[in-house]
Amino acid sequence: MALGPHAEALYGILSVSGVRTVAELVSRTRLSQPTLSRALRELKSARPTEFVSFGMGGKTVGYGLRQSIRGLPLSVPLHACNGPGPVAARIGVLSALCGGGFVFSAQEGTAPGRERIRYFAGLPWFVRDMVPQGYVGRAFCRAWAGALHVAGNPQEWSDPEAFFILASKGADAPGNLVLGQANLDDAGVPRAEAPVDRDPSGLPALFDRMAQQSVAGEFPGSSAAGEFPKFVTRYRAHGQVRNVIVKFSPEGEDPVAIRWKDLLVAEQVALETLAGNRIRTVASATSRLVRGQSRIYLEVDRFDRSGENARAGVVTLATLDDEFVGRRASWTDTAASLVALGMVSRADADALRFLEAFGRCIGNSDMHHGNVSFFRDDHLDGRAPPALTLAPAYDMLPMLYAPERGEIVARTLALQPDTDRTAAAVALQFWQAVAARDDVSPAFRAIARANETLLSRI
């Protein structure tokens, strides 16, 4: 359908300049508002799949044009996969806009036109954590960047490129969301390595092989954030499917490799201490140590997966802060802000405050916002804040003592005068447990005993 001159002018402006309001369009075209309104109605009628309008806060309405990214549909379906089995609910469609930005059209029933449209200046917050990142994310890039014609570093991707990658290779992204019909078709298909029956005694050899593939850049995996070497897999043991993230130490027995092994043991002790002490318990990811030929593996159960296909919606504290707070000052600060917004319970905020205090007492110098996650619901239409529940603790270990640039650096744990006494008491149990382990090095046991003495004085 041919466009009239005014509608044609609007189409050109929105194609090049991106989202615009009525006031901006009036200024650009110098049309009267009645004439502009008629031209907008004409454009909507002639280009119904491309044209989109949405609220931008208050009474302001934005107008834009959907665009296809590298041959993707103008509107890419977004499904929530909630198990057990390949059960998926379509919760809306996501579209990239000409000139930048995205719109999410949330499904509201089955009747045509029953949708609520939300505009995002960048990739929507509820899909950001699906983008490959960290150590395994870089392995993903090494496997797929060439075929997808994108940079080998995920941090260099534009939002449209990330959108394209999620719609192309996001069948097993973290969380429960699946973008694109092709990915949905693949989501219920078991990956090559799983589920398989495994005698636990065969895990060391399996993990040794996977670690070598990971180091060589041959293991695509799904993305798990963080810099510790790791891979993601699942297997069946004793009739149950385990969905796990596996961290691993370097090979060998040099001081650096030994220290990384100490830290993996310490991480398991920290998770067990948090979940099993009588002073202040906090839900923590279940973990197991596996000893390979020359590496140690820390196998941590994924809380966004269970069984054959069941998934759970998750979002990191980093994404929540970026979208709703904008400071990333501390875990405690962000949690307090989310409580004020009605998104997080006071109980969960208090648990997070305790976790942060405990982390300081064990020398966790890597408590960035990506190391905390929340379960979230699938109501993403924006009419109410997402319902969030604190997920189990993970990545809690004394990174203060990690090697730096291939060397062991002597460091001393420093406690603040206002150290939380409850957190200190639980941390004391942690250091006592580490000092009693016979699978950590003498040097690390000495560190544990020194910190045990320090905390016993509080």
Image: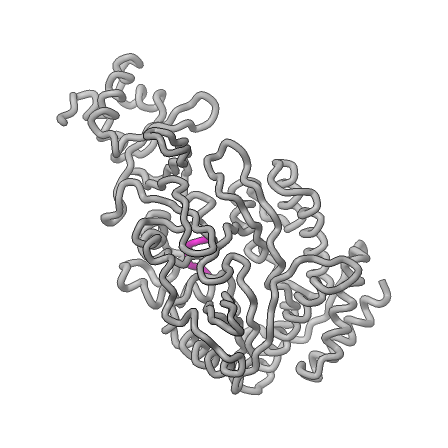
In the rendering, at what x and y percent does residue 33 appear? 31, 14
- Looking at the rendered image, the quarter that the N terminus falls into is top left
Compared to 50, does 450 lie above or below?
below
- Looking at the rendered image, the quarter that the C terminus falls into is bottom right
From the image, give the main secondary structure of the stretch colored magenta: loop
For the point 32% across and 64% down, which residue is it? Answer: 144
Residue sitting nearer the eye, 49 or 325: 49
Compared to 29, does 178 lie above or below?
below
In the rendered view, how is the structure colored?
Answer: one colour
Residue sitting nearer the eye, 285 or 353: 285
Q: Residue furthest left?
A: 2
In the rendering, at what x and y percent does residue 385 appear? 55, 36
Q: Residue furthest front?
A: 239
| Part of the protein shown in magenta | 129-133
* Horizontal relation, residue 11 to residue 344: left or right: left
* Horizontal relation, residue 68 to residue 213: left or right: left
For the point 53% across and 79% down, which residue is it? Answer: 200
* Horizontal relation, residue 349 to residue 405: left or right: right
Q: Residue 34 lies in magenta, yes or no?
A: no
In the rendering, at what x and y percent does residue 452 appear? 79, 71
For the point 58% across and 48% down, which residue is it? Answer: 328
In the rendering, at what x and y percent does residue 220 appear? 38, 67
Compared to 67, does 177 lie above or below?
below
* Horizontal relation, residue 114 to residue 422: left or right: left
Q: Residue 130 lies in magenta, yes or no?
A: yes
For the point 41% across and 36% down, which residue is it? Answer: 106
Residue sitting nearer the eye, 147 or 76: 76
Q: Quadrant of residue 183?
A: bottom left
Compared to 245, does 103 lie above or below?
above
